Every structure is written in structure tokens, then in C-alpha cells.
Image (spheres, rainbow, N blue to C red):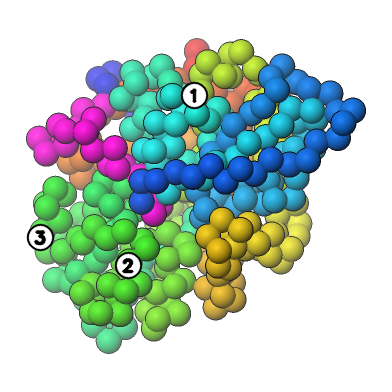
Amino acid sequence: MSAARPLKTLRTFAVIAALPLLLTACGYGAESTDDGKQAEVAADAEKLSVDEVKIGYFPNLTHATALVGVEKGLFQKELGGTTIKASTFNAGPSEIEALNSGSIDIGWIGPSPAINGYTKAAGKNLRIISGSASGGVKLVVNPEKIKSVKDVKGKRIATPQLGNTQDVALLNWVSEQGWKVDAESGKGDVSVVRTDNKITPDAYKSGSIDGAWVPEPTASKLVAEGGKVLLDEGDLWPDKKFVITNIIVSQSFLKEHPDVVEAVLRGSVKTNAWINANPDQAKASANKALEKLSGKALPAEVIDPAWKSITFLDDPLAATLDSQAEHAVKAGLLEQPDLKGIYDLAPLNKVLKAEGHDAFDDAGLGVE
């Protein structure tokens, strides 16, 4: 991405600073909660350069690296005597605000809020330091109303929020079909209905929407209500991979406590390896964590297909984040942002080298 102008929204997005919910990734609202999750630390465990590291993530399957890593104590094992304090968020902007205020040091987050947060702060607040997950996004439709792609024209399709990661993806896909939609209003050849994921299944059941472009587990909840997967977003990407969850860190925390950042990244790498080696146990661990956070576990008919559609990996898939930003520009949601410096993969690649793995590329968007 060559342009050097900071992120600016177009006409209707001029109030972005007053709309903290713009550009979320898979969010379920704006609130954040301190879940008080602190793993037990051995009395003789040696502390790193800080007593406590504060991490944030969503109670969402696409954030299962964090869910499982905390639940299984895999992060705490790498941190030694430095305690881990976990907070959960329901939307990307609130997590970015927490990072900016110092309420968290490291977070799991989607591409759109990472892009938005970085550009709004003129590249001074965060770095993306690793990938975490790919996939887990589907277009689910009412099979009685939509039997093929051409039938989507003229229908009402929900996305989680104006300008969020899935909203951008749907608008880009609609454009590629040769159809036109006004990004701001959602009106056009397809009616884009911005609907909170919490109520999307009810909207589907009531018939107020004909389908939805949504992340897991919302997509599988719709299928459980009789919906049909018309499109898996992974099929639109090279090798069927695209970033859905990144790991970000406060630049000041990265500078002051690189040993802690590396420990968290070791925990993430080992958690992803454990998830991929033990998918059924990992799924149960993630569901156990979700039950603790929400009070209710996901039923098998939802979590089983949802889990299969998500790939857990350390690769940040940087080129796909760059493409997602370009899609937002193409849709008219953004002017061209300058993402140079959004990545610092040196700590991750150091960890990967120590584990005998190959380094990952930042697609030319890394720090100098």
C-alpha cells in the first residue's frame, strides 16, 4: 500500500472519533469485562521485567488461542512469576481504547479495528506482533429465498456492524458481482442490514433478514436455525486463508518489556500447536472458557461445525490485511491509509526460530 495519507473516513464517517464502534471485528457490543482470570503462580517462580501483564480478547471462537491459552495455563507457564490478568471485550474499538489507556498491554483483535486504531493514532499506539486465526466467516442464507448467488440480489443480508471486517468483505463481494450498494446506508442492489451478532439469529428467525455474512459461532447458530451456507469467505482468498484475528501490543509495552512480550508469544505459539495437535480437547477447552465467561456453553450442533471452519496459526497473513484495507477503500469506507510500520514481527520470528520454525513475512508493512 503506497499512499501516505492517514486514515480519514469519507463524508459520513467524519464522526469516527465519536463512533467508537466503527470498524469492529466480530464484535458483540461495546462493553468490556474484567474476568479476573489470573492463573496460579508457583511461589518460587521467577518474575520477568513486570509483575503483571494485562491481556484482552473476545469471548469468541476466533479468539480461541487466548481462550485456550489462559484456560489451560499455557501462557502462565511461559510467564513464570509474572502474573497474567485477562479481560474480555465485546468489540474491537473498546479493546483499542483499553490498549491506548494502558488498561491492557496485549490483545487479540480483528484486522479492521487494528487498522483503524493504528491509523487514528498516526501509527504511534500499537503494533501487530503475530497472527492467531484465519477463517470462520460465512454467508448463511435462507434456502427458501436464496438458492444461488444470483438470488442474493434484492435480498436483505446482515453484517455485524457498519464498516466492520465482515461488512467490508460483503461490500467487496457485492461489488465483484457487478451490483451496487451505498456503503453508508446499505441500500442498493443488496440491502445490507447492520445487525448485532447477538440478535442476528432472532432476526433470521423472524424473517427480517434473508441471510448474514457473519463470523463463528453466529454462522453456525444460523445453520442450526435452518440456514444454509452459501459461501465460505475462505474460498475467496488464496490458499483459503485470510486473517481474522491478530495479536497486538502497546508500542510502549513492547519497548519496555520485550521479555514479557516474547513470553506471551511463546505461549501463543505453543497454544496453537497444542490446539492443532489436540483439536477435540482444544474445542472442549475453548467451550469451557466460553461457559465461564458467558454462563452457557455452545451446543454441539453449533460448536462442532464452527470449530472446523477456523484455522489457528501464527502467521499474521499480512498480505491479506493489506487487501482488507484496500477493500475498505474500494467500498468507499476509507481513504487510503498508510500501514507502514503496523507490524513488528521480530519478537515472533525470534520465538519461532528458537522453536525450529520458519519466520513469517510482514508484506512490506513492518517497522524499519
Give the labeled residue for mark 1.
Answer: 102
Residues in magenta, as a range: 7-28
Cβ–Cβ below 8 Å for labels 3 and 1? no
Mark 2 / mark 3, whichever is N-terminal = 3
Give the labeled residue for mark 2.
Answer: 200
Residue visible at 64% across and 44% down in the picture: 37
- The three-letter amino acid code for the residue at tag 2 is Thr
* Mark 1, secondary structure of its residue: loop
Percent coordinates x, y for residue 190 in the rendering: 16, 64
Residue 198 in sight: yes
Percent coordinates x, y for residue 42 in the rendering: 86, 35
Residue visible at 25% across and 20% down in the picture: 5
- The three-letter amino acid code for the residue at tag 3 is Gly
Nearer to us in this view, 273 or 76: 76
Percent coordinates x, y for residue 293 in the rendering: 56, 56
Q: Which mark identifies residue 188?
A: 3
- Magenta span dominant secondary structure: loop
Nearer to us in this view, 79 or 112: 79
Relative to residue 335, is residue 127 drawn left or right?
A: right
Instruction: Verify whether residue 14 appears in magenta.
Output: yes
- The three-letter amino acid code for the residue at tag 1 is Gly
Which residue reaches farthest right?
Answer: 44
Nearer to us in this view, 180 or 45: 45
